[in-house]
Structure formats: structure tokens, C-alpha cells
Amino acid sequence: MSMRWGMTVPLGGVSLADHAAVFHGLADAGFTDAWTAEVAGTDAFTPLTLTAAWEPRLRLGTAIAPVYTRGPGLMAMTAAALAETAPGRFQFGIGASSPVVAGDWNAADFVKPFARSRDMLRFLRAALAGEVVDEAYPTFTVKRFRLERPPAVPPQLMLAALRPQMLHLAAAEADGVILNWLSAADVHTALAETKQAGPDFSVATRIFVVPTDDATYARAVGRRLITSYLTVPAYAAFHRWLGREELLTPMWEAWSAGDRKGALAAIPDSLVDDLVVHGAPDEVRARVQAYADAGVTIPVMALLPTPELERGGMPALNELITALGR
């Protein structure tokens, strides 16, 4: 298996205050990493701060902290604080996010996402190294900012990327790339755009998993996720680039017409099975391993609800974590 084996935290149905047992269980099961997302649930940093305090065996990562929802200085301070809390264990993933998250929910102007991501990456590289930053970047200006507590071990900087331009930027200027919403077979296509990266370049991928033998249930969950994500312009363009335009056009057309049921029905089982991992825990492990075999160095599961978990509660969750570990 991959030397790294990650889980997205926090887990659904468990309060943050009760996650110490979850983090211990993940480490005991052989998980090496805890990674967060930042959409409309928890922020990206609080769960990782708890992880750092409660379970020193786990490495930490954000996938992602959006580049629009915090000012440059606050972004650097937050990352520096977590890097100081967990020296050498934190990888800082940033990305453009989406117009909904940045604009509709956080009142930011979602403009020039490539340039904003590039500028934030360059600012963070300098700021987290303890430098004085006094520069007019194309998308923002910073005047004489210097961290009062630069981390002794700056975090590796990772960039979320989907298509060639952002993938090239990640390879040229970041320490790693974060992929999302692709199949194991798609990994080669994405990584072909990162050939200029160095030998220690990290590749993280969030993989949605529904560990149940109930394929009908899993595919229903997967279809809802696909309509939530792949109708976002950046993800739609990504899958056109991957060659799925013909397959996804019926779903996109129904969605644009306001026909939500039709959009769900237009998604073939084969696409759900490619993009959402489901099955018994051993099958899930094998399919996640396929991402590692394709070049992903940090496969990160995102655990979705199942009937078994809803019936079994915490005992079932603990058993599942053990079964999904390595």
C-alpha cells in the first residue's frame, strides 16, 4: 500500500469534542494522515489543531483553504500557528475553491482564480519563511508584513489543481498538488502535466468512499455528489478536458434546465462507479490503493454515510475505521 493513508476529518455524526477517540482509532488502524476540507462545515484549521494536540502520530493537511476567504496576512498567521503546533507534520493546501464558496457565502470577488492562487502561493512562500513582504502582486498588495512567529519548520505548500495551467503552476512553484474528483485511471492524465516537478513532489487526492455492499444506495449518494460538484464550471471544464463531455452533457443540460431529477437520472452507473468508491471495506481499500499505484502519494478517503453506519453508530464506525486502515 501507499506509505501514506489519509482520512478526511471531522467524521460525520461525531462532535468535534468527541474526536480524540476517532483520531486515536485512525492512527491505531494505520492511517498516517488527517486532512480537512473547507466548504460549509468546519473550517480547515480547527479540526487539525485538535488532531495535533490529541494524536501526534498523524500528519495533517488542508485540502483546501480557499485563497479568497482570508486576507494574505491572516492566511499566513493561521498556517504558521498550525505549523508551530505540529512541527514537520503539516502540509498546507490552498486553492481557488468556487464562486459559491468564495462569492455567495463569503462575500469575496471570485475573479482571476489562477492569478489569485499564484499570488497567494508566492506570498505564503515568502511570509512563512519569515521574510518581510512588501509587494504589489497582480491580485493584491501587501505592505511590510512580517510574521512575528515564523514557524521553525515551514509547512510544505500544496496547490489544488485541475487543468494544465494550474497543474503546471503547482509543479513549478508548489511542493505538491491536490487533485479531486477524478478516477484512478485519470491520475496519469493529470500528472502528465506535472513532469517538471521535483522528486519529492507530493500528490494528494480526496477520494469519496461509500463502504457498503448496497450498490443502489451508494450510487444514489454518488449521483447527488456528482450533480453538486460537476455542475460547478471549473469541475465541468475539468471533465471536458478528461474526455467526458459526451457522457456528462445530458446531465449538464438537464441541470441547466432546472430538471434536477432528470440530471440525476442522466448519470450512468459506470460514471458513479469510476468517481465514487463503494463496496465492502476490502474492496474500498483495493480501489483506493489503485490511486496510489497510479502516482498518488497521499490518498485521502472522504467517508460518506452508509446504512450500516446509521444503524450501528460508534461501534460500527470504529470497526469500519479498522477495516479501512492499512
Image (cartoon, grey):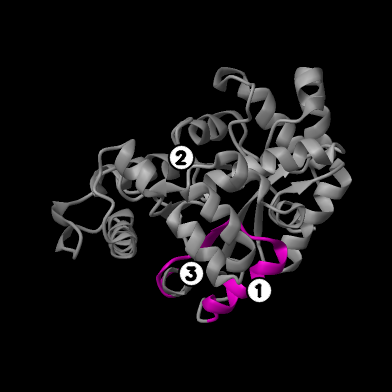
User: Is residue 46 rendered magenta in the image?
Assistant: no
Question: Can the viewer see residue 3 in this picture?
Answer: yes
**Residue at point 51%, 41% (across, down):** 37
Depth check: 301 or 31 in front? 301
Image quarter of the N terminus: bottom right
Please provide the residue range marked out in magenta.
169-195
Tell me residue 294's x, y (percent). Answer: 72, 69
In the picture of the structure, the residue carrying the numbered disc 2 is 38
Q: Please, what secondary structure does the residue beneath circle 1 have?
A: helix
Q: In which quarter of the image is residue 2?
A: bottom right
Depth check: 51 or 65 in front? 65
- Residue 50, above or below 76: above
In the picture of the structure, the residue carrying the numbered disc 3 is 163
Q: Please, what secondary structure does the residue beneath circle 3 have?
A: loop
Q: In which quarter of the image is residue 305?
A: top right
Marks 2 and 3 sit apart, C-alpha to C-alpha, by 21 Å
Q: Please, what secondary structure does the residue beneath circle 2 have?
A: loop
Q: In this view, does 196 lie to the left or right of 134?
A: right
In the picture of the structure, the residue carrying the numbered disc 1 is 188
Q: Which amino acid does label 2 sit on?
A: Glu
Question: Can the viewer see residue 62 in this picture?
Answer: no
Depth check: 145 or 308 in front? 308
Q: Point out the tag, 1 or 2, that comes first from the N-terminus.
A: 2
Task: Please state which of the two labelled residues, at mark 2 or mark 3, is closer to the viewer.
Answer: 3
Marks 1 and 2 sit apart, C-alpha to C-alpha, by 27 Å
Q: In this view, does 312 lie to the left or right of 262?
A: right
The answer to whether the residue labelled 3 contacts the one labelled 1, judged by CB atoms less than 8 Å apart, is: no
Q: Point out the tag, 2 or 3, that comes first from the N-terminus.
A: 2
Tell me residue 145's x, y (percent). Answer: 17, 51
| Mark 3 crowd level (few <14, some 14–19, many ≥20, 10 Å Cα) | some
